[in-house]
Every structure is written in structure tokens, then in C-alpha cells.
Image: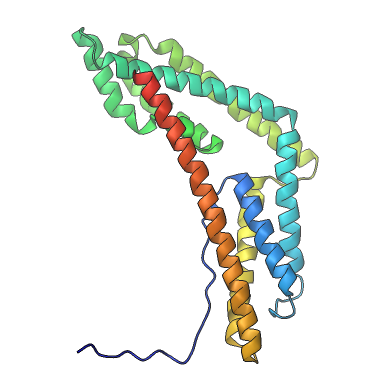
Amino acid sequence: MKEKIEELPWRSVKIEPGTQKTFDAASHAVFINSQYTLLKEFGEERLHFPEGLMKALGEMADLETGALVERKKSTLTEQLKAKDAERDKALRYIFGMIRTQLHSPHTAEREAAEELDIKLRNFRYIRHQGYDVESGNIDSMLMDAERLKKEIGTLHLEESFDCLREANKAYERLVKERDAERLANNRPSMRNLRPRADKLYELACQYVQASYLFAQTAEERNKIEELVARLNQRVRNIKTSHRKSASQRRRRGKEDEAAEGA
């Protein structure tokens, strides 16, 4: 006979953590704006927010949206996309050639390809990562490649690695120019805005949860519970949208790899 477990008479609410730290810029801006809107509609007084918290969160949501718009408008954006495309072409060619030469009838080429495949395989899909992450990983790949000059020469890939190096340097220079442009316009970058927005949002969540615990009436607790349910639904919706987008990028990447290996 199973022992009956009595439910506790006390209840609490918990706002589900988002994956906002891994969101791309657009998803993060949507996340912060949507959660701010729900909190604002409910009312900062009812949630016992300290003076200035709701205003600060709203300003951060506006700044993120503004930074996103400016990023799209900047003339440097198209140049960045072009340089990123150059990097991707070089990466696609390098790894396509390595994969092809794994089946070479010539021992020297086959062995060089095998060594490169082992030492560089962790970088095979970096072109599907976020731009800044890709830049750092290309730098790491090029450092590893310095110890593989013989194998790279055997497969005649020196020029391709040089193209990758130059495209990555150019991309990083453009990023610095874009940041300088944004600074000149007194607009903070998304890189600086996101952690600040996350801290404000997490603080707001703590006040919501505390307000539920110390609500004076059952009616008010029920209202806060409904708010938390809506906040959580938004979290789940945005996470689902983000996962679908990431999955589509990965699928396109696999299709590219399959086409290259054909």
C-alpha cells in the first residue's frame, strides 16, 4: 500500500528561466520587450518594485530595440556580411578538400588529410556559429594550423588558409569600426546592453515571486499566479522559436556538408 503524501498548505510561484544568454540579438530584444510589457501592464506598485526598477527595465528594452535597428541600418553591416561570406567560403573549401583527400589514392595526400581531419575537426562547423564566436574560433583554428604547415602544403591549401586569415582580420577590423561608430553616436552595443538587461529582468522576477508570497489576499495571489503563467508561456514560446531557428541553421549546415561531400 502506497503511503499517502500530504500536500503542503503553502504555495509559491517560479518564473521559468529563459535561455536569454544564448539568444541571438533579435530574440533577446523580443524576450526583454515582451516580459517588460507584461510586467508593466500588471503594475509595478502591485509587485512592490522599488522606485526606478520598472523604468530602468523599460529603458533597457528600448535601448536593445534601438541598437538592433541601428545595427541593421549601419553601412558597415553589409560589409560585415560580405566578409563573413568570404570566411565561410574559405572554410567550406578547406574542409571540403580535406574530406575529399581522405580518399586520395596517393599516400602522402591521404595521410596529410587524415592528420588535418583529426587536428581540425572541432572547427568543421564553426561557420554556422554566431559571428563573434566564429571570429574567435577561426583565430584558434589558425593557431592550430601553424603546427600543420607540412600537411597544409601537401594538400596545396596555403592560399586558402591565407584567404581565411585575411578575411577574418578584415571582419574584426570592421567590428571595431562599427563599435566606434556606435560609440560616436552615444549608443551602447548589444554586447554591453544584454547583461545589464538580464540583471534587471532577473531582479524583477525576484520581486514578482516575493510579491506572491507576501500577498495580502487570495485574490491578489491568484492574479500574480496568472501573471507568472503568462510570463512563463512567453518564455516557452520564445525558447521554442529560438530552438526552431537554431535547428534550421544546423539543418542547412548539414545539407551544405552533404552537398560538399557528394
| Residue 87 seen anywhere in this rendered image of the structure | yes
Query: x%, y% of residue 114?
Result: 24, 21
Residue at 50 percent across and 16 percent down: it is 163
Viewer-proximal residue among 149 and 27: 27
Residue 250 placement (x, y as % from top left): 44, 36
In percent of width and height, residue 42 lies at 71, 73
Residue at point 79%, 39% (across, down): 184
Count of all numbered marks drawn on residues in the image: 0
Assign the N terminus to one quadrant of the image: bottom left
Q: State whether residue 14 is above or below residue 3.
A: above
Left or right: where 62 falls relative to 222: right
**In the rendered image, which quarter is residue 205 located in?**
bottom right
Of all residues shown, which one is farthest toward the front?
1
At 72% from the left and 45% from the top, the residue drawn is 67
- In the rendered image, the quadrant that contains the C terminus is top left
240 to 88, vertically: above or below: below
- Up/down of 38 relative to 224, above or below: above
Left or right: residue 121 compared with residue 190: left
Question: Which residue appears farthest toward the right when viewing the image?
Answer: 185
| Residue 140 visible, this angle | no
Which residue is nearer to you in this view: 262 or 133? Answer: 262
Residue in the foreground of this view, choosing between 61 and 195: 61
Please tell me which residue lies in front, 59 or 170.
59
Give the image location of residue 75, x and y in percent: 74, 28
Residue 171 position (above or below residue 90): below
Determine the image quadrant of residue 40. bottom right
